[in-house]
Amino acid sequence: MRRAVSEAATGTLFGVALNYQGLLQSRLEEFQQPPYQKPPVKPVLFIKTPNTRNGDGQAVVFPAGVERLQPGPALGVVLARDASRVSEAEAMDYVAGFVIVNEFSLPEDSYYRPAVKAKCRDGFCPLGSEVVGRDEITDPHALPIRLLVNGEVRQQNSTANLVRSIPKLIAEISEFMTLHAGDVLITGTPEGRVDVQPGDEVVVEIEGLGCLRNTVVAEEA
């Protein structure tokens, strides 16, 4: 069953950093240096605040005074009911469905501490118009995902390359906090983020979920 995002995905937007194998591998040397000393052993979380919510077909504003803006194609997982201390084996029972997300950000200096100023600008988190029911997706861990800018493929990957699976994310996060019905877990963006400019059309495609389309516009003076 498919439901409108405005009905099904009404809760908190939780982002997960470093959840693609290629991205994590590219940072391993950095994580051996101070102050980190080792790669993260638990999910690195951040929140996309309510002001970041945006929709399919809507504009994404390129903020004045910044040099670079980067889209982030991602699979969103929508919770069907409250989840607290859920086991990995039971975690998918708490999933309502899936939604396309484009997690826009300014370039980040630290993956360990994603900056609010980089992540939480107005309109920086477009979601697709529909939540596709869990039963409609045979395997959410085998979904091709593509980012197109002005019709050209600029990023492509697969959810097969997630560091932590969806059940593992739900289990590890719900171990210390309650996830609520309508919350969205943004499962991560692949390596190779690209820059976009005002006037660009940005499209995220995920197999079985359709596409999410936005246009970048310059911030008005």
Image (cartoon, rainbow, N blue to C red):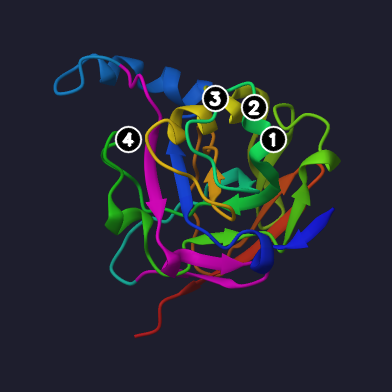
- Report which residue position mark 1 lands on: 93
Residue at the (62%, 65%) spot, across then down? 214
Residue 33 on image: x %, y %: 19, 17
In the rendered structure, are the residues bearing label 1 and label 2 in contact, judged by CB atoms less than 8 Å apart? yes
Residue 105, relative to residue 139: is it above or below? below
Q: Could you say whether the residue bearing mark 4 is in a helix, strand or loop?
A: loop
- Taking the spot 54% from the left edge, 40% from the top edge, the residue there is 83
Q: Which residue is mark 4?
A: 111
Q: Nearer the viewer, mark 1 or mark 3?
A: 1
Residue 41, by quadrant, is top left
Amino acid identity at mark 2: Glu
Query: Is 130 located above or below residue 162 in the figure?
Result: below
Residue marked by disc 2: 90
First in sequence, mark 1 or 3: give its number. Answer: 1
Lateral position of residue 213 relative to residue 197, left or right: right
Q: CA distance from mark 3 to mark 2?
A: 10 Å
Range covered by the magenta-colored residues: 39-63
Which residue in the protein does label 3 denote? 168
Q: Position of residue 201 (x, y in %)?
A: 63, 63
Depth check, mark 3 against mark 2: the one in front is: 2
CA distance separating discs 1 and 3: 13 Å
Q: Label 1: state its secondary structure.
A: helix
Quick one: label 3, few (<14), some, or many (20+) residues within 10 Å?
some
Residue closer to the observer: 138 or 72: 138
